[in-house]
Image (cartoon, rainbow, N blue to C red):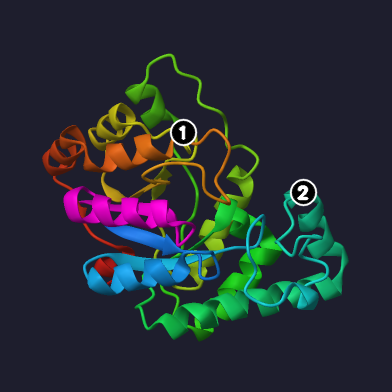
Amino acid sequence: MKRLVVTADDFGLSPEVNEAVEQAHRDGILTAASLMVSAPAAADAVARARRMPSLRVGLHLVLVEAWPTLPAADLPDLTDAAGLMRADMGRLGLDFARKPAARRQLGAEIRAQFEAYRATGLPLDHVNAHKHFHVHPLIAGAVLRVGRDFGMRALRVPREPREILRRVEPGARPRPALDIAPWAALLAVRARQAGLLIPDRTLGLAWSGAMTPARVAALLTQLPDGLTELYTHPATAGGFPGEAPGYRYADERDALIDPASRSAADASGAVRGGFSDFLG
């Protein structure tokens, strides 16, 4: 059986993102959104989610390049001079391995974000992380350990089959995700051992920020059996704090409400919902 979760990341990042999420859920194929609990428009996102109980919402953990939940002074190894989570993912990952203090701060920040999510009162549909940083083995361990205390039942594992992309755009050479592929395989094993629901595949990695209407509609025609997550970054416009350079946010919003995408999703025969709708 085909099952499909269509997710918007960065819910709460800006009013433009939140408005696009609402549009894409009400008028399009979006079924889920991942909330950044300490981003500037998080309160607005929560209010919108409460008005849309059919939208499944999860936690988008922020451990790099955005706003922490704990005071920056409590996270000296994790934050920069501006009080944001550090952007140097490679060196930060090494610091987690080398510095016990950094690991303690990491665990505390992850717990604070889970606690902030629980305070919203929204059911926890799923968990993932900004820039997929939860594939780092030490971060993964902390997420699995802390998430158990907060009822985490589903986790994104970012693995994307290249053959699907080649069928969608023959001859295309999407940028590789080999930097996370081995760690994603390990994460899948650990998540399954923890009894979590994970997607069999996640579409949107290679074309992150460029999930155009044509690509989304074409991907939906290629859905295999099993649980597929198709994730996006919609917004009504760019120009907001924290946006990713070069991302085509409005195109991704358009892809979620385009009639061709809706038709392709219907024609696929996939049962659609959030992760919580597919728990056994």
Residue 19 among those drawn in magenta: yes
| Tag 1 secondary structure | loop
Q: CA distance from mark 1 to mark 2?
A: 22 Å
Q: Is residue 40 left or right of residue 195?
A: right
Magenta segment, which residues? 1-29
Q: Which residue is mark 1?
A: 207
- Whether residue 214 is situated above or below residue 84 in the rendered picture: above
Residue 242 among those drawn in magenta: no
Q: Amino acid at mark 1?
A: Trp
Residue depicted at x 45% and y 83%:
118
Q: Would you say the residues marked 1 and 2 are in contact, meaning their CB atoms lie under 8 Å apart?
A: no
Residue depicted at x 49% and y 45%:
159
Q: Residue furthest top?
A: 171
Q: Amino acid at mark 2?
A: Gly
Label 1, residues with CA under 10 Å away: few <14, some 14-19, many ≥20: some
Work out which quarter of the rendered image holds the C terminus and state it. Answer: bottom left
Q: Which residue is mark 2?
A: 90
- Residue 13 position, x and y percent, is 49, 58
Q: Is residue 107 left or right of residue 200?
A: right
Q: Which of pointers 1 and 2 lies earlier in the amino acid sequence?
A: 2
Relative to the observer, which residue lies in front, 43 or 152?
43
